[in-house]
Image (spheres, rainbow, N blue to C red):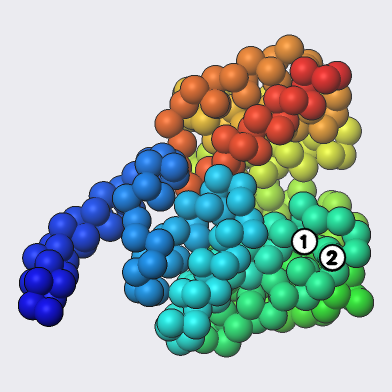
Amino acid sequence: MLFPLCFSVLSTPARAQANRKAEELYNKTEYKASLELLDKGSRDAAVENLIGRDYFMMGDFKKAVDFFRNAAAIDPSNSDYALWLGRAWGRRAETSNSLLAPGYASKARHWFEEAVQLNSRNEEALSDLFEYYLEAPGFLGGGLGKAQRVASQIASVDPSEGFWAGTRVAEHKREYGTVESRLSHAIELAPLQVGQVLNLARFMAKEGRVQESDDLFKRAEKMAPNTPQVWYARAETLIKQNRNLPEARELLQKYLQSQVTPNDPSKQDAERLLKRVNGA
């Protein structure tokens, strides 16, 4: 009877080291390698959450839901665990058939709301709940008024993110002059942030102002040479416009060969875009 106890005690440091290594691999987007180091029967909330994140990033949203649900059950007070469970239900809604999608979307909304309720200053939870309210139809709990209220919450936590949320609201109201003005002002406030330039470049493209969009993408490339974020944004925009597809293909191929982070678009998303280009 002593041997299992001794083994457990002796294995704890090794297990903790393996978990730290798994987190490092996750941050390097080496999700499969991360998953192989983790104990699937640990009943540790942090480990269950990391397993879920690995599956999520690998595109297995069903398994991700299972592990995020375990993490949330073990530690129901953790806002981040609720947030990730909402994200997984959201992706299941996006990738399922029309009969199942509404139910999954409602679960996503519930867990986003839960995450904000658990921590009203969780910026990522506020952002995801804002996007849900902004994009979802009313019968699924979405609504512009709800989105505006969350935008105010975001602004109280991070004024710059609140400014961006307000810009998104203006876009949904089709106040395009306001949108352009706000995006230009954001660049003035943060002239070294390439993301602000990309936001305006995407907007110009949607407005059909192709030359201005192209010029802004060139500006972004000069600001941040050889940056995967810029490559992906440019490729995605070209594909949506169905133009310069050889350039989009080249940019996506570079993106797939680059080192990205979990905060960047996934390489699975890049591969899906590349399939669209190759099928064009």
- Whether residue 171 sits left or right of residue 183 in the image: it is right
Give the number of the mark in front: 2 or 1: 2
Badge 2 element = loop
Residue 254: quarter of image: top right
Quarter of the C terminus within the rendering: top right
- Residue 119 visible? The answer is no
Q: Which residue is mark 2?
A: 100
- Whether residue 258 sits left or right of residue 248 in the image: it is left
Residue at the spot 73% in from the left edge and 12% down from the top edge: 246
Amino acid beneath label 1:
Ala
Q: Which residue is mark 1?
A: 93
- On the image, the x and y values in percent for residue 271 come to 65, 30
- On the image, the x and y values in percent for residue 76 come to 48, 85
Which residue is more in the foreground, 270 or 200?
A: 270
- Residue 181 visible? The answer is yes
Q: Earlier in the sequence, mark 2 or mark 1?
A: 1
- On the image, the x and y values in percent for residue 255 come to 55, 26
Residue at the spot 85% in from the left edge and 52% down from the top edge: 176
Residue at the spot 57% in from the left edge and 41% down from the top edge: 266
**Is residue 16 placed above or below 148 in the rendered structure?**
above
Residue at the spot 12% in from the left edge and 79% down from the top edge: 1
Badge 1 element = helix
Residue 43: quarter of image: bottom left
Q: Are marks 2 and 1 in contact (CB under 8 Å)?
A: yes
**Is residue 26 placed above or below 250 in the rendered structure?**
below
- On the image, the x and y values in percent for residue 162 come to 61, 68
Residue 155: quarter of image: bottom right
Which residue is more in the foreground, 68 or 63?
A: 63
Amino acid beneath label 2:
Leu
- Spatial separation of the CA atoms under disc 2 and disc 1: 7 Å
